[in-house]
Image: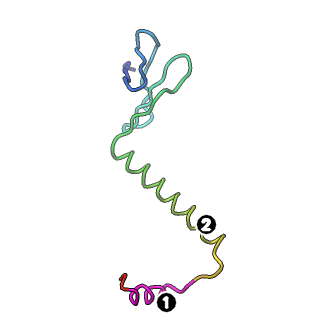
């Protein structure tokens, strides 16, 4: 496969044998012959998908924390009524 130079990590293919491994059409993995993976370049689509998955994981962790630490739960309809009375909805 073709060699790529990745200035952000500062390696030069004349110094290190580098090559691109195509994991998927939207992901490039830059490696060298000595220590393996050096960097990953994602397409915008793959990056947005990764962000969504991270946000979903953060939401799940926050929900788990709330369930573990909650002393009581409020009915959603009652919660909305409270927000309306407070002028927040």
Q: Residue at x 49, y 59 (%)?
A: 56
The C terminus lies in quadrant: bottom left
Residue 46, horizontal then vertical, whole percent? 39, 45
**Circle 2 or circle 1, nearest the eye:** 1
Give the farthest residue toward the top.
14
Q: Which residue appears at 43% of the width and 20% of the height?
A: 19
Image coloring type: rainbow
Q: Residues within 10 Å of mark 2 (few under 14, many from 20)?
A: few
Magenta segment: does it hold 65? Answer: no
Q: Secondary structure at mark 2?
A: helix
Report the front residue among 2 and 51. Answer: 51
Expressed as whole percent of the image width and height from the top left, the position of residue 68 reads 66, 70
In x, y percent, where is residue 21?
Answer: 44, 27
Tell me where residue 23 sits by quadrant: top left
Q: Residue 78 — which label?
A: 1
Q: Is residue 61 left or right of residue 40?
A: right
The alpha-carbon separation of the residues under discs 2 and 1 comes to 22 Å
Please state the extent of the stretch shown in magenta in the rendering: 74-86
Q: Residue at x 48, y 53 (%)?
A: 54
Q: Is residue 14 above or below residue 52?
A: above
Q: What residue is pinned by disc 2?
A: 64
Is 17 displayed left or right of 5 in the figure?
Answer: right
- Label 1 sits on a secondary structure element that is helix
Overall secondary structure of the magenta section? helix
- Residue 10 vertical placement versus 83 (above, below): above
- Tell me: residue 3, above or below residue 76: above
Q: Position of residue 34 (x, y in %)?
A: 55, 16
**Farthest left residue in view:** 44
Q: Crowdedness of circle 1 by 10 Å Cα count: few (<14), some, many (20+)? A: few
The quarter of the rendered structure image containing the N terminus is top left
Asked where in the image residue 42 lies, by quadrant, the reply is top left
């Amino acid at each position: 496969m073709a060699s790529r130079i990745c200035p952000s990590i500062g390696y030069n293919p004349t110094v290190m044998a580098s090559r691109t491994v195509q994991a998927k059409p939207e992901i490039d993995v830059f490696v060298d012959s000595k220590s393996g993976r050096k960097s990953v370049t994602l397409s915008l689509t793959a990056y947005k998908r990764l962000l969504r998955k991270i946000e979903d994981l953060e939401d799940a962790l926050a929900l788990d924390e709330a369930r573990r630490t909650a002393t009581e739960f409020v009915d959603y309809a009652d919660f909305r009524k409270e927000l309306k009375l407070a002028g927040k909805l």
